[in-house]
Amino acid sequence: MSRESLDRGGARVASRGKECVRILTSLPRTVSKHKVAALYYDVFRQKYDGLLMIPRSREQALRVLTASIDCSMGIYAVDERGDLVGLVGLGCSDRGFVKYTWKLLLREFGLCGAIRRKVIKFFESPRLLRDELRIEGIVVANAAQGKGVGTTLMDAVTEWAAQRGYGSVRLEVINSNPRARSLYQRLGFHDTGRSYYGPLTRRAGFTSIWRMRKELR
């Protein structure tokens, strides 16, 4: 069982046995933006390779993500050594965790490739009301799986959103990840709808998504 407390700097600390994980609302100096991009891509690789980016190589994917991630829209989990073991990317009505610029896509993928990826990103990112916060993605490193990091990150998101006046937190979960959906339900999220894509998204590892929401008021 994990226990939570606050350290002297106000960061949430989750401990399980002898291991402690700190939850931070800003990127620590021990973690580079490239490391953030690498963890995010490696966990969501099938989605990025099969649909969201379709890069020529991992190196290209990391180059694009490193240039596109807004680290101020993340919440981070680091271990006692300062290594990144998990993160949540967030989006609101006017900002997001991952946002491609047209100039970057044009340079990396050419005109047709840039248009295609811009269109996919547009449909992948729902419009949000001013009081809605969206979880774009939550990732936990393999070495930290099963240690309560994901649950602690989700709790931190809810606290962060409530402190800033958001009325609800939204997320989407793919049909091929029922364990994640069950976790979100236990944490107070409820289904608000489902979208079916069939063969259009099969290469990305799913055929439909559940939309979920947690009310904060």
Image (tube, grey):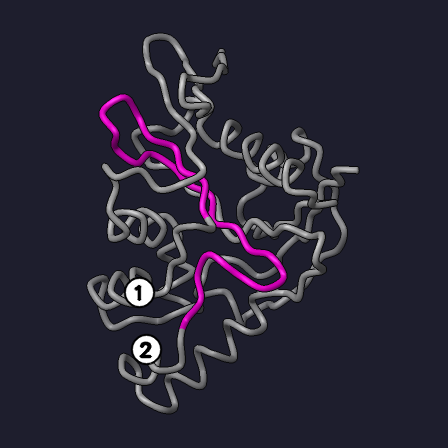
Residue furthest bottom in the image: 111
Residue 33 vs 103, above or below: the answer is above
Q: Look at mark 1 in the image and give the residue it sits on.
A: 67
Q: Earlier in the sequence, mark 2 or mark 1?
A: 1
Q: Secondary structure at mark 1?
A: helix
**Residue placed at 45% from the left, 40% from the top?**
75
Tell me where residue 111 appears, x and y as whole percent.
36, 91
Q: Secondary structure at mark 2?
A: helix
Question: Which quarter of the image is occupied by the C terminus?
Answer: top right
**Residue 216: image tag:** none
**Dot 1 crowding, Cα within 10 Å, few <14, some 14–19, many 20+:** some
Q: Is 80 in the magenta?
A: yes
Magenta highlight range: 74-100
Q: In the figure, residue 113 lies in which quadrant?
A: bottom left
* Numbered mark located on residue 104 in the image: 2
Disc 2 to disc 1: CB gap under 8 Å: yes
Residue type, mark 2 in image: Leu
